[in-house]
Image: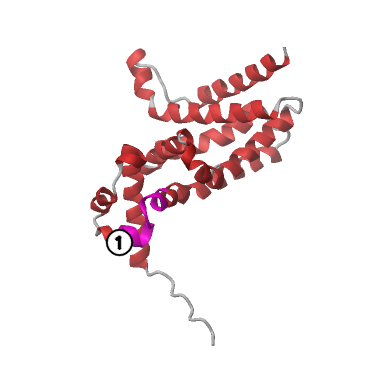
Amino acid sequence: MEKQRKRAPSARSLETRARILDAAEMVFAERGFEGASIRDIAAMAGVQVGLVHHHGGGKEELFHKTVARRADELARIRIEGLEALKAQGRPSLRGVLDCFIRPYVTLAQEGGAHWLAYGRLVAHVSADVRWREIAAECFDPTAQRFIAEIAALYPDADAQLLATGQVYSVAAMLAFLNTGWRVQALSPGADAAQVELLVEYCAAGIEAMIAADKR
């Protein structure tokens, strides 16, 4: 006897799921995993608590789904940019870093509040070892691809050092988006939104680390 074909979710079901994940994104970003509650997510989404469990599962599963949702799109944009850069010839360190950093900065600045909130989710994942499986699934493949490209430029550099430089660059990128107000507070009128300076900062840091390691 043939198995009954699984019915595709309706447009209404997909819309409800998207609304729940949007709400989860904002609540998790604002309050962190511990501070967020399923009830608050349901209230923001305008649905019953049972629907949050139906579409998202338990709290940890919902957090995982919320983080994973945008990871593929961001990875695709980064890899496409990197491939286009390589098609023009041997890339520079700054070019490779630009392909990694600029896509998310652009999405966070122009793609609406949810992309900016997503950066806070990434920061939560990066700062807590219990989310290592989420990081490994959603972020490590792309990060390792970019580390490999940098290693090709510096074949004698220590692999662990390059991985450290990648992690530091991600931290700088997240700080760039979330702490511009601090730059303004310390230097009123300063332009804290120049992605070129961020890329230069990260590239110079990696180059300094490589040079120091050779001494």
Q: Which residue is at 42% across, 30% downward? A: 177
- The part of the image, by quadrant, that contains residue 47 is bottom left
Q: Is residue 104 above or below residue 22?
A: above
Is 141 in front, or is 85?
141
Horizontal relation, residue 152 to residue 186: left or right: right
Residue 32 image offset from top left, x and y in percent = 35, 38
Residue 141 image offset from top left, x and y in percent = 60, 44
Q: Quarter of the image for the C terminus: give it.
A: top right
Can I make out residue 113 in this image? no
Give the residue furthest to the bottom: 1
Horizontal relation, residue 203 to residue 36: left or right: right
The residue range painted magenta reads 52-63
Kindly identify which residue carries mark 1. 51
Residue 173 image offset from top left, x and y in percent = 48, 29
Horizontal relation, residue 187 to residue 97: left or right: left
- The part of the image, by quadrant, that contains residue 139 is top right
Is 36 in front, or is 92?
36
Q: Is residue 3 above or below residue 132?
A: below
- The part of the image, by quadrant, that contains residue 205 is top right
Question: What amino acid is found at the position of numbered circle 1 in the picture?
Answer: Leu
Q: Quarter of the image for the N terminus: give it.
A: bottom right
Q: Which residue is at 69% across, 30% downward? A: 159
Residue 114 image offset from top left, x and y in percent = 37, 43
Assess whether residue 90 is covered by the magenta stretch.
Answer: no
